[in-house]
Amino acid sequence: MVNNTYPILDNLIGLYDPNNAKVYQYPWHGMDSANLQTGSNFQYITILDLRTGVNANSSARVSSGLFGLNFDQAGSIYAVDWDKKITMMFSIARTTAEAEAQMHVGLRENTNIGDIAAKGFGIVIDNLDMKGETYDTLRAEVDFSLTMTTNRIYAVKIVHDPAHGQIEWFVDGVSKGISTREPTTIADQLSYLFANIQNGGTGGTDARGYVGPVWLIMEK
C-alpha cells in the first residue's frame, strides 16, 4: 500500500514491485575515513562535510561497506548484486569553486580516491561541473552540461537498470544522460558507499562539498 506521507519515496518505490524491493537510508555518520594534507571530513546524521583545506594535493575520503544489496547469493555480505535494479538518491552542494578540485559520490568496489576504476556508478564534479560516471570493465563518463551554482543544493537520482542495459542520471527531476556501460553480475569483493574530494598541485583554496543522506532502493 502506498504511504502518501512520503510522496518522493512513493514515487521511487512505484518503480518496483512493492513485494520485491528493499529500501535503505544510509546516513554519513560513523564512516571509515582517510584525509591527506589539509583534507578533512565531518560526519553527521544529516550531512557529510568534505574539505580539502588550502594545501596542494590534499584530499578527504569516506566509505562504508554496503550491507543488504546481495540477496539469496553466496559470497560477501557486503557485496552488491549488480544484476538487480538499484535507484540511488541524495542531495549535494558545493560552496567554493576551485579549478583543480574534484569530488565523487557513488557506489564502487574499492575506496581509491579519484575517477572510478572498479565496478560501480555515481557522479563526479570537476570544479563545479557535474557529470555521471560508471564502470564495468571500463570507465564511462556522461557530461550533464551542468555547472553548479555555489551554495545551492541539487537533488541527484541515479537509476541502474540492468534489465534495459543502462544507467540514467537525473538532477532536480530532469534526465541528464544515459550510459550503457553499467556494472553487471554480483560483486566478487567488498562494495562501498563512497565519497571524496581532492584538489591538485596548486592549492590555495579550501574546496568544500556537502552530501545529504543516501537513499537506496533495490529489487530483491
Image: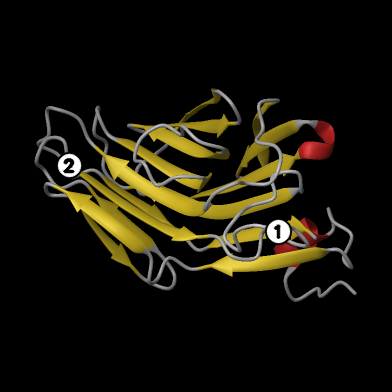
Say if residue 152 shows up in the picture: no
Q: Secondary structure at mark 2?
A: loop
Distance in Å between CA atoms under marks 1 and 2: 39 Å
Task: Tell me where residue 168 appears, x and y as whole percent.
Answer: 69, 35
Q: Neighbour class for label 2 at 10 Å: few (<14), some, many (≥20)?
A: many
User: The disc labelled 1 sits on which kind of residue?
Assistant: Ala
The residue drawn where x is 65% and y is 65% is 68
Task: Tell me where residue 90 appears, x and y as whole percent.
Answer: 55, 55
Name the residue tied to disc 1. Answer: 74
Q: Vertical placement of 71 versus 95: above or below?
A: below
Name the residue tied to disc 2. Answer: 58
Q: Is residue 118 left or right of residue 8?
A: left
**Image quadrant in which you'd find residue 167:** top right
Q: Neighbour class for label 1 at 10 Å: few (<14), some, many (≥20)?
A: few
Which label was assigned to residue 202? none
Q: How many marks?
A: 2
> From the image, which quarter does the N terminus lie in?
bottom right
Q: Vertical placement of 39 versus 170: above or below?
A: below
Q: Is residue 97 left or right of residue 126?
A: left
Q: Is residue 33 left or right of residue 66?
A: left
Q: Secondary structure at mark 1?
A: loop
Task: Tell me where residue 113 appears, x and y as whole percent.
Answer: 34, 40
Q: Vertical placement of 25 versus 105: above or below?
A: below
Task: Tell me where residue 41 appears, x and y as whole percent.
Answer: 26, 59
User: The disc labelled 2 sits on which kind of residue?
Assistant: Ser
